[in-house]
Image (spheres, rainbow, N blue to C red):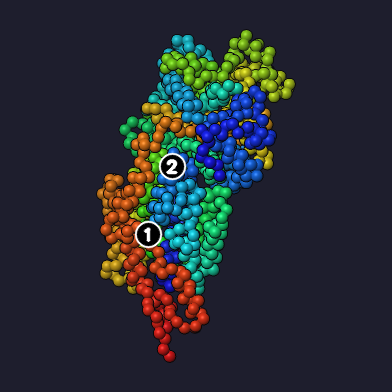
Amino acid sequence: MAENFFWVGRYLERAEGTTRLLAEHHQLLVEDTRVPYGDGCRVLLDALALGEAEARNVDNPHALVRAVLGSTSDPGTVAGSVTAARENARAIRDALSGDVYEALHGVHLRLRAATSSEIEPLSPGVLLHGVLERLAVVAGVLDWTSPRDEAFVFLRLGRALERIDMTARLLKVRHDLLWPESGPATALRAAGGLHAFLRGGHPLNGEQVRAFLVLDPTFPRSMLGCALAAEQAARELEALGSVSPHGGILRTVGLLRSELEFVPTDPSPEIVDHLAIYGLGSATEAGTEVRTAFFRQVGTVVWSH
Amino acid sequence: MSSVAGNESGIKQDHVPPDHANPRYVPLAHAYDEMFDADGVVRAGLEPLADALVEMGPEGLRERGRLRDAHLSAQGITFTLSGRERPLPLDLVPRIVTSDEWRTVSDGVAQRIRALEAFLADVYGRGDIMRDGVVPKSLVTSSSHYHRQAYGIVPPNGVRIHVAGVDLVRDDAGTFHVLEDNLRSPSGVSYVLENRRTLAHVLPEVFAGYRVQPVSEYPERLYRALSAAAPPDIHHPTVVVLSPGVYNSAHFEHAFLARRMGTELVEGRDLFCRGGFVYMRTTQGPQPVHVIYRRIDDDYLDPVQFHPDSVLGVPGLLNAARAGAVTIANGVGNGVADDKALYPFVPKIIDYYLGETPILPNVPTYDLRDADVRAFVLGRLDTMVIKPVDGSGGYGLVIGPKATDEELAQAAKSIQEDPRAWVAQPVVQLSTSPTVVGAGALQPRHLDLRPFAVNDGRKVWVMPGGLTRVALTQGSLVVNSSQGGGSKDTWVLASQDVDDDDGWIGAEAILASHQQSRTVPDRAPNSPRDSLPSPHEARMRQQEEQQQQNLGPVAEREFRFPGDRSC
């Protein structure tokens, strides 16, 4: 059950982050055709670990949208992660409010229809916008109908770890290098952080944007913001006795948080990039630890009367 | 979907378009059509767009129109017209400007702004140009926008025209002419940015055949120019956007710019002056303000100096600016340089200060203060466009050939009463472009172009793009958005000779860096997404079996919460 909550959090976050990234990447690819379609498609697929663009014949914005929306069977894609979130929610349907399940099921149906249809959507932008809206509804309903119990902490932990992963992948696309003029703003939009960034009064350039997405303590999708959230969740689990105070998950996310929090002022771009890679590694590690600590596969339980 | 091929594929021959593209599209006889030449052949470079329009057909255009409307209304991209918020109509057919054409526009606009900067510095300083008799002193001092209050205010980096919008039209030969300068609060730039995003949203495939220069860096450029205009010794200036408030027609734009620049949007009552400095009221007490990008008129800016009953302004602002504590952008009194009566002198002004010939010609304009000229104009009023010198937004405009007799008589009377208040120009047949009207049909509609220039004190940057306004009414020459005009996304094409390898980092390098980061130890070889170990199918299968047998394996559900540990 805790496992399912963890994975609902993770997959929902993945679906949302991937859709947002895809929508903004697609928009830029369409708007600024000075970067060849092929290149634009390759960097995104590669960052999302969705395979070689050439091998998959993805060389235009429509094909890219199709590839990243993906299929319900590949949990690295949008449709796949929503399906996976729904599968996990199905297993804990009793523990979720009806509203949550209904909202989630709605996105699932919509994506299933969109990805199984042979007809190209008239406007991928409109389609992706619609998906984002529905995912926002799911997140909102989850937020205000879920009791703040241990299960919710697991959900938050999953969400925070996935966000770190997502932000690292977003940074791997290097919008700022491919599109020097509009790339930095796109990277921020893809994380939903353009507004937060600008309010901070930073100059809008690639280096500042990357530093913000890794190190900003106030923005909930920066790596530091996520690491803080993950650490907070891990500490709550520790207080509840679910997590050992020694080593493991708490240590991994705690170390990550302190690495990110206590950086020198005005870190060089190399340090930022290094921390981004470190963050991705830590998130993967923490994910593995959660899985091994709580969700060991068990053998057949034999019931005796 | 439209193919990328086109330019050199010899498509021209089998393009007999006006009829083919849409049976009803017939370019107007006396106007330059931006898509079709006089023989009805698609102009070079516009074939991909023409193809895409043909492919979509009226039904496709209707469908896209619905998507666009939904998008614009959902985003709240509006323009307030007569007190009612409504979306600025965006036509689906983009207007395309080639890189060569654009070079003329961009150089011409920058030249004009440099000259007008010099002119403003002069008339609010030594006044050389008037002493040398190039521009009559009486013309300057009689301008309702010449403010003695601005005399002696020297902006820190010498810039008074931080933002300019220069209205251009193309005559029947396709040559760009300057119709008017807007040096006070040129508006519309937010729609340029939003139009681009909207069009990419609803017509992604049309972009495929083109390399369009981006417009999205405008807010950043503006912010840098405003910061550069801050008083000296201020390293992190506080920039604010001063708006008249939510009831102003351009409030969407004010909020848009403030948001995109990361600055505060303030109204007059949020600011106050004390001891020659300007402060913003905040929850943490007064905060000094260094640069005010104001979108309110001079007359309302400072009740101490101008309209004493202004509730929009900030008392004492002008004195603070004079003391050098704050920079007002655009400068106070800029209106004297975009006065329509001064407009005929701009070529001379360019020559006087820069020693250059104007790159963009003016539209011939009659100075009505001269009795002979006045008589000449009054004799042929029905062939003229009569404009109030200090008007904007198309208010007060009289178009001779379209005006009724009463309107002409009224105009003649106004001119005789106050010749200084009006100018006359021969009617310019604005260029046309296919525009979607009614149920998806394409028809020629007149348009103009407002490029935006930003001056940071070192360079005048002209945004590659601009607001194309289109007169949606058949035959109408009035494109102003306040007169029910629409807009088009303006694509300035990237020049073909600039290739991708001018310092850009390509996809290869990025992919290579992905490879590198994968070789960091402790990472799975392909850094795949972390996903549930067992495929769902397996679990589903197991669960199905479980139901049949009513006993069997309990899969991976070892951990439960305390309350659930019932077994």
Query: Residue B425: which numbered mark, if any?
Result: none
The kind of secondary structure element at disc 2 is loop
Q: Closest to the observer: A56 or B552?
A: A56
Residue B379 seen in render: yes
Give the residue displayed 31% in from the left and 55% down from the top.
B518
Q: Is residue B256 above or below residue B308?
A: below
What residue sits 69% from the left and 34% below the top? B24
Residue furthest out toward the top: B372
Residue type, label 1:
Pro
Percent position of residue B436, x then y: 63, 38
Q: Quadrant of the C terminus of chain A?
A: bottom left
Q: Which mark is residue B528?
A: 1
Distance from the alpha carbon under mark 1 to that under mark 2:
26 Å
Q: How packed is label 1: few (under 14 Cα within 10 Å), some, or many (20 or more)?
A: some
- Single out the mark in the foreground, 1 or 2: 2
Q: Is residue B14 left or right of residue B559?
A: right
Q: Nearer the viewer, residue B295 or B10?
A: B10
Name above or below for residue A229 compared with residue A184. Answer: below
Subunit ID for the residue under disc 2: A
Above or below for A283 versus B392: below
Task: Give the number of the disc on residue A36.
Answer: 2
Where is residue B562? Give x, y as percent: 40, 77
Which class describes the residues within 10 Å of circle 2: few (<14), some (14-19), or many (20+)?
some
Q: Nearer the viewer, residue B342 or B113?
A: B113
Q: Residue at x 28, y 45 (%)?
A: A268
- In percent of width and height, residue B32 lies at 60, 25
> Mark 1 belongs to which subunit?
B
Query: Is residue A203 in view from this perspective?
Result: no
Residue A191 image position (x, y, % from top left): 42, 51
